[in-house]
Every structure is written in C-alpha cells, then in structure tokens.
Amino acid sequence: MRLSIFVVPMLVVFAACGEPPEIVVEPLQVLSWVPNRGAQCVAARAGELVAAVTFSDDIDFDSLNADTLFVRQEGGTAVASQIAYDKASQTAHLTVIVDLDLGAVHELVATDEIRGVSRGHLATELHSAFATISPAGCF
C-alpha cells in the first residue's frame, strides 16, 4: 500500500515535466485575393498585373516563393513573376513579368506549403480564377 502511495504522486510529477504540445487552434487562411475570384478584364501585359494575397498571419518568408505562390493559365504551368511581402499588412504581392494570354482564364494559386509564423501551413491549396482582358477589350 505504501508503495502505491509513493508511486502515484511521482507519476503525476514526472508526467508534468514534458514539453507542452503545440496546438494550432485556427490554421493559416487567405483573407483576400486581388484579382478577386471571378474578376473579368484583368490586365494581361507584363508588369501590369500585380496580384495580392492577404493572410491571417505573418508569413514565414522562406515558405513564400515561385513554387508556393504563382499565376498560371487555368490548369497550366506557373508564369514568371516576382514576389514581395509586406509584413505590416501580411500581404504578398506578385508581379507577373511576362504577357498573359488575352481573353483567357488564369488563376492565382497559393499552395499548402505557405507557412504562417504562428498559425502553421494553409490547410489546402487555394485557387482564385480570373479572366484577362480580351483582344476586343472590355465591354
């Protein structure tokens, strides 16, 4: 009986000595996209399209690159772009540096490899589809 009186409190003490688990209550989210999902007549010339993605947490800049945030023709491959990040607004700005096809559907993609400092990764890959200006212009 005396042994159990000693062992049980010691188990409780030793169990409390480990590192606490890290719990992410709310994962990283995209709060806004520019161009917005479904936007029409978006600029298509190199340098004119500056996409922006605002996140719910400060982003670990090492996780933000051409493989994790990009523009592509719907279902195609990523087009050349430059990424800048504004820590104060938690917004990534992506400038497309090649001409996009006119009158085509493109998408801004944020992959689940993008990581927030406090909230971890995006839960899934996200897409925001938009259409570039047509050769005839916008009506």
Image: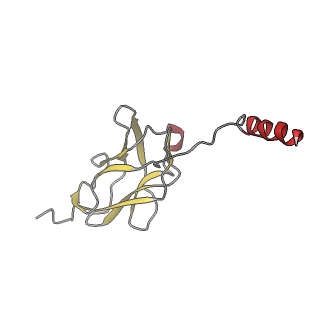
- Near-viewer residue (66 or 110): 110
Which residue corresponds to the image point at 34% horizontal and 62% vertical from the top-left? 106
Which residue corresponds to the image point at 63% horizontal and 42% vertical from the top-left? 21
Which residue corresponds to the image point at 38% horizontal and 50% vertical from the top-left? 30
Q: Quadrant of the C terminus?
A: bottom left
Outermost top residue: 88
The image quarter in which residue 17 lies: top right
Name the side, left or right, on which 78 lies relative to 21. Answer: left
Outermost front residue: 1
In the rendered image, residue 1, in percent from the top left (x then y), is placed at 88, 43
- Near-viewer residue (43 or 19): 19
The image quarter in which residue 136 lies: bottom left
Name the side, left or right, on which 62 lies relative to 135. Answer: right
Name the side, left or right, on which 103 lies relative to 58. Answer: left
In the rendered image, residue 60, in percent from the top left (x then y), is placed at 50, 38
Outermost left residue: 139
- How many discs appear? 0
Above or below residue 104? Residue 116 is above
Which residue corresponds to the image point at 48% horizontal and 59% vertical from the top-left? 124
What sort of colour scheme is used for the picture? secondary structure
In the rendered image, residue 84, in percent from the top left (x then y), is placed at 40, 38
In the rendered image, residue 73, in percent from the top left (x then y), is placed at 38, 64
